[in-house]
Amino acid sequence: MDKGIYLFEEGNAEMAQLLGNKGAQLSEMTKTGIPVPSGFVITTERCIEYSKKGEMTEELKKEIDSYVQKIEEKTGKKFGDKEQPLLFSVRSGAAISMPGMMDTILNLGLNDDTVEGLAKGANNDWFAYDSYRRFLQMFGEIVLGEKKDQFENIIAEQKKTENVTSDQEISLDGMKAIVTKYKETVNVPQNLNEQLYLAVEAVFKSWNGQRAKDYRRYNKLPDNLGTGVNVQTMVFGNLGESSGTGVVFTRNPATGEKKLYGEFLLNAQGEDIVSGARTPQSIDVLEKAMPEAYKQLVELLDKLEKHYTDTQDIEFTIENGTLFLLQTRTAKRTVAAAVKMAVDMVDENLITKEIALTRIQASSVEKLLHKQLPENLDCKVLTTGLPASPGAACGKIAFTADDAERRANAGEKVILVRTETSPDDVHGIIPSQGTLTLRGGVTSHAAVVCRGLGIPCVSGCGDLEIDMENKLLKLGETTLSEEDFITLDGTTGRVIPSQAKLTEPELSNDFLTILDWADEKRKLKVYTNADTPKDAKKALELGAEGIGLCRTEHMFMSADRLPNVQEMILSQTKEEREKALAKLLPEQRKDFKALLEIMEDKKLTIRLLDPPLHEFLPDEEDILKDIAAIKKTDNKEALQQKEILLKKTRSLHETNPMLGHRGIRLGLVYPEIYRMQVRAIIEAASEVQKNGGKTNLVIELPLVAEERELSIMKKEIGEEAKKVMEETGERVDYLVGTMIELPRACIIADKIAEHVDFISFGTNDLTQTTFGFSRDDAEDKFLHYYFTHKILDEDPFIVLDKEGVGVLMQMAIDKARSVKSDIQIVICGEQGGEPKSVGYSHEINLDAVSCSPYRVPIARLAAAQAALGKQPA
Amino acid sequence: MDKGIYLFEEGNAEMAQLLGNKGAQLSEMTKTGIPVPSGFVITTERCIEYSKKGEMTEELKKEIDSYVQKIEEKTGKKFGDKEQPLLFSVRSGAAISMPGMMDTILNLGLNDDTVEGLAKGANNDWFAYDSYRRFLQMFGEIVLGEKKDQFENIIAEQKKTENVTSDQEISLDGMKAIVTKYKETVNVPQNLNEQLYLAVEAVFKSWNGQRAKDYRRYNKLPDNLGTGVNVQTMVFGNLGESSGTGVVFTRNPATGEKKLYGEFLLNAQGEDIVSGARTPQSIDVLEKAMPEAYKQLVELLDKLEKHYTDTQDIEFTIENGTLFLLQTRTAKRTVAAAVKMAVDMVDENLITKEIALTRIQASSVEKLLHKQLPENLDCKVLTTGLPASPGAACGKIAFTADDAERRANAGEKVILVRTETSPDDVHGIIPSQGTLTLRGGVTSHAAVVCRGLGIPCVSGCGDLEIDMENKLLKLGETTLSEEDFITLDGTTGRVIPSQAKLTEPELSNDFLTILDWADEKRKLKVYTNADTPKDAKKALELGAEGIGLCRTEHMFMSADRLPNVQEMILSQTKEEREKALAKLLPEQRKDFKALLEIMEDKKLTIRLLDPPLHEFLPDEEDILKDIAAIKKTDNKEALQQKEILLKKTRSLHETNPMLGHRGIRLGLVYPEIYRMQVRAIIEAASEVQKNGGKTNLVIELPLVAEERELSIMKKEIGEEAKKVMEETGERVDYLVGTMIELPRACIIADKIAEHVDFISFGTNDLTQTTFGFSRDDAEDKFLHYYFTHKILDEDPFIVLDKEGVGVLMQMAIDKARSVKSDIQIVICGEQGGEPKSVGYSHEINLDAVSCSPYRVPIARLAAAQAALGKQPA
């Protein structure tokens, strides 16, 4: 028979397929000289064989026995020994981590005999019987499938008998009584080999459990990989004052600072730190408490970081002065930390710039642009907890995850406040502005989740009190309800019982360094969608190379211009309309001149008016109200005007405005509108050029569906531009561009390309028409249902739909380039600043992405990652 | 030099490329032994050479001279003869007829000498000088480019001098004076060869005139074809009582009857017939007037019809007893005549069935199925809207659907007149004679419903105004009330403000014969879109082979069911909803049973509920009115109910309902609705089968965008169907189908095909999303502008857009068949009954088209034509 079991020292990180990921990692650590509790891995192949045969073979049992013997030799302990019993943990571990696989069984190897040995070794009978009790329960639940209730009932009964409230208070005799009752309830074999075989078999079986199978089907993973089984010697951090347990990061996961960061507890087990039941001490304290172990730990951490060339997150246990590392993994980190670590590690020659760039999750970069509390805060601080996830956040208090989700989805800004959080709370954390917990440290559940999400978090505010019944948060005299605002500073841990003003963030030098490196590597240009000088300046500051989309309609909306816009719309004749447009002309010219002066020779893409005209008119209901009011005053002229307005509003009403009279359709029916805009653009550019400035213009036509729309409108533009140039005597160069926002435009992109030099995918609209989803309606009407029921994995309005919209885009790109190889093609929908979509834009060879100013840094980084062959996320 | 000129007897019909179409036709007639005035054709090649060289070569002039000589020999007349001068007409004639080419020059060969010869030959000086005058003017205008005004002024002056009003009254001396003045004005050469060279050159030049070039560019015709020049001997029908001219058809072009049909005038020229200045006589009279010529004419007509194997429309001239045919062409005809001619000619063994089928314009067939307005309408037309559903209808005006229903049920004939219609109006449309709407195009709700029902409809009469308060319909001075009759012509869009007399349709045996032949030839199946037993029966009568689309929503709209539908929509919980649905179940079962019994083993495709639920609720405005009214009565319970209704109506409101919560999205969020429908279908089918009937069912899911929508819903359907079959003990076979109505569905059609056996293109919706055109808005907002300004040639909601929508369809077909080669694919949009679209459906290998009942015959014929390789129109 081939080799079916590997000692940790026989494997390495490359063997994940055979040993599972956990087994391979434990092997790698062992190989690297890290003191890992001894153990072995039963290979995934044995699991596959088991699946085929449906039973444990005698050969496998013998093989397991022989490896138990090897561990006995290595540790000097004996399985079943009444003095120093060897105990195991048994864990599943597939090549890909998978929910639904078997939970860990600890303390395997205990029976009525060995429990005495454990007690003797630890010099602690209560500990030993408590461990035995726990083992029986775990084995009962996990391996034998017994209900949790019956175990809990036995404990509850015992506590009642002894009249105590916590497990810790149960007497030794009580604990022994519990063990006796457990044994009556559940048939855990006293034979230790039998225990081990059954546990291994349970792992094998869990591979074909319903939940694991569902997960694989859903994620399209093959069913024939199998799982490894990790059998590892138990070590105990709770054997007294020379024992302990802790969690430590090689660098600060919140700031990136190169300094050990972590916590430990003396005389405790790992779960005590995670649960938050006891408040742990800073890792620095360990140096004084156990200088030898601390020194060894520091050396090991250094070694591990160099080995893995990344910040490590390590679990350790000290058993009677001996240090063991139980796990090392790449540390989760805030984006600020990720940036600092990446830049530092390049400085330290630990990694290359390329690797540094791929170490930062592009989507998380947005958090660096998030708000902060002002330096000189003038609000009262209620209390200060642990700075668990940086950044400031403000919102009204939500006391349950469900409340938080519901209210946030309704548009409210909320802060989730919980005693502590568990995975059940994640759906409430995600939509919240920030999270506050009363218990738990900087490695607690809330802290880890929030850092991952880039959401501010303050943890361990033990002096606060929650009154769940009345939904109140109290501290001393202060009482806050769901209606009250609270502000968190996750960078310092401060909690402010009011709505504090937040300030804009500042880009760190490290981050600017990363973005410079990104610019060196990326192929995609990054433009911005900006309609105002303020947006344009911000975008340039954040590295935009031009404006890929300037929407002119927002310019029409200001209170002082709207009357002229409405006059234009209400015009009965072309002449009247031209008169009204003439009033708008100088304003538009000013708009464009300001933008041109900011952009200089960088591209400025101006999209001519797009929305349906009724968007500029008041609601029918409001007009009716006005009319009712005017009727009382007997002002006939005012009444007549309102009635004209009403009639026009009604005549412009559309059942489906998204598919209505907008975009170039507007320009074709009312060419004088587009001509006014073109005049304003060319006049503005003339002025700028005459003052010695440069211009780099694209005049863009929206919502094209048919070639002739373009050919006609391009002619109109050319005529008007020529006229202005003749008037001003100044030649202005400009490109004509168009937006592809409709499936038909994708299909006829070759014909479109004959008329334009610039194409921009308006993927918001293209997604709407490709799916037949109205952005205005779909989200709350049915898309939410689609996401929760997994009908769609992602919101196609956020992440570009490669399967549908992407196919149309590729068709359009191929067709357009087939007739004009140097045509510029960009994307300017919301997806243009979303990392996965940026990656896709690189993949399909777009020239540029264009996104809102604050997303420009994300796009720069994501574009670099894509160019480096890493799928940005 | 190669041969550059052909006598008519040297050419034939196949030589259109070289001789131009007219030249080839004249040659063919000559070759067939038809007495055509002699002449020759200068080839298109000579024209091309001229275009290259820019001048007439001496060789060409000599070549022309030699052919003039040949004509002199053939006719015995001499060019320039002072006794019997030979005169020519000169005409252009390219291979494809083209506006902008040169007009005809008549009487070329006249000068101061030959005019005397002409006078002598005709024994009519006035005629000769009038001819000379006309020639000088034609030559001046056409060849020399002189202005028409100066000629007209000279005539006007002469008439003033003589104090007469018509040209005919001018004296011989006056006519001679005009000739003298013309010659002073314009330099027409007296040299006759020169005249001919210049005329030929003018034809050559007109090939490269701006209008002809524009026409070619617009129609994508090549510029290098050139035109032929036809030089033909003049003959005169006005040389006295043994001369004459006429027009004759070989069969009656209005009825198809096999009997000569035409008119003639003695001592007249062709233009006298066309101008209507003299009233011509029936062709029968010619038999008595000139028995010899008549006999010859009858023989020639018979020969021509046999030669061209189709009814001919002929121009003839008799010059001094000698018959000449000037032109023959295929006769235009009414559709009734086309049908009779086609069937008769097959009986006569003149043509094959295949040819007969291609002789009838498929689109015109619709006229045979509807009541019509008489050809010679003597009523005032109020306005003309869009021809939304063909046929004529007459009735009194009803302004609401309720009124229409009530009055129609009371036996009155009514026309429903609405601003626009919604599903709420269907109960009023059904009993009406016709529907008139102020808004909406030919694919608006009213249009689609009416076409489906075969009810005439005129839509988009934007100039009409409805005064709902006083129930009046206004336009300018005209005001119509409920008591007034109105007549609609849905075939032309005319609206007549009175009671016009209508003519009844009848399906002739000839037409039925044609349809039988069509069925033998066609490859496409023809299904129908039918929702009611009445529609289904009518469609079967008209030859439908099944129902390709049964829309279930119309079944929900009847007054007695709507309350239950609304109860279902207003339900707060799934349980409440199921209770309301349970009330609808027996009604739906009845619906389906009735259809199944009619269809027997023919396909019945039932589409599950498609429209957004708010379509079943009243308008917000109406509810608000009700609430205001109830408030006065203090009925609290009623008020509360209305307020719940208002709230739900508002919550269901959508900005773009076409892209909203409808189709399968509805079924996914409320599976109990689809389950009720599936239960009703399967229960109905069980009953039918138990009674010995057969069923052939497709259950169809609308508006799919994503594969998982289908996989989930198919499972639901399967579960419900299985449950019912277990209850009834009756196995019911059914296919699951889906509608492809969205671009994304086309793109993922391979994935879709894995879940269904039947795909139906919903090309109405697919056109909407591909173009981004809302059917409800686009027509009157901008599409009308698009058609008048040639931005689009055809309405894509009427004629399938091959360039855009068609590309998506082909993609879908390829992908679907790539995974399931035997999948059935049909089209069921409005275009499914339009001939060009039926042709395209054949071309892209669809299995079937499905159209409204009255379009079934059109589709049958068009499908046959397509199968015979002729593009239907």
Image (cartoon, coloured by chain):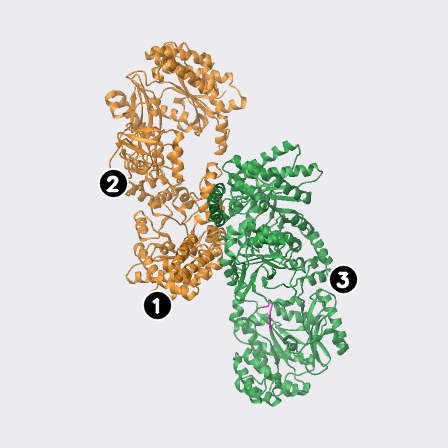
Chain colours: A orange, B green
Residue mark closest to the camera, 3 vs 2: 2
Task: Give the amino acid type for the residue marked by disc 1 in the picture.
Answer: Glu
Callout 2: 10 Å neighbours few (<14), some, many (20+)? some
Which residue position holds label 1?
Answer: A727
Q: Quadrant location of residue B334?
A: bottom right
Which residue position holds label 2?
Answer: A374
Q: Looking at the image, do the residues carrying marks 3 and 2 touch, with CB atoms under 8 Å apart?
A: no
Residue A667 x %, y %: 44, 59
> What subunit carries mark 2?
A
Q: Is mark 2 on a helix, strand or loop?
A: loop
Above or below, B419 relative to B151: above
Residue B827 x %, y %: 60, 49
Task: Give the amino acid type for the residue marked by disc 3 in the picture.
Answer: Glu
Residue B395 x %, y %: 62, 59
Above or below, B442 relative to A155: below
> What subunit carries mark 3?
B
Residue located 57% across and 48% down the image = B761
Q: Does the magenta portion include B414?
A: no
Which residue position holds label 3?
Answer: B348
Q: How many angstroms separate mark 3 from mark 2 (CA)?
A: 100 Å
Magenta residues (range): B92-97
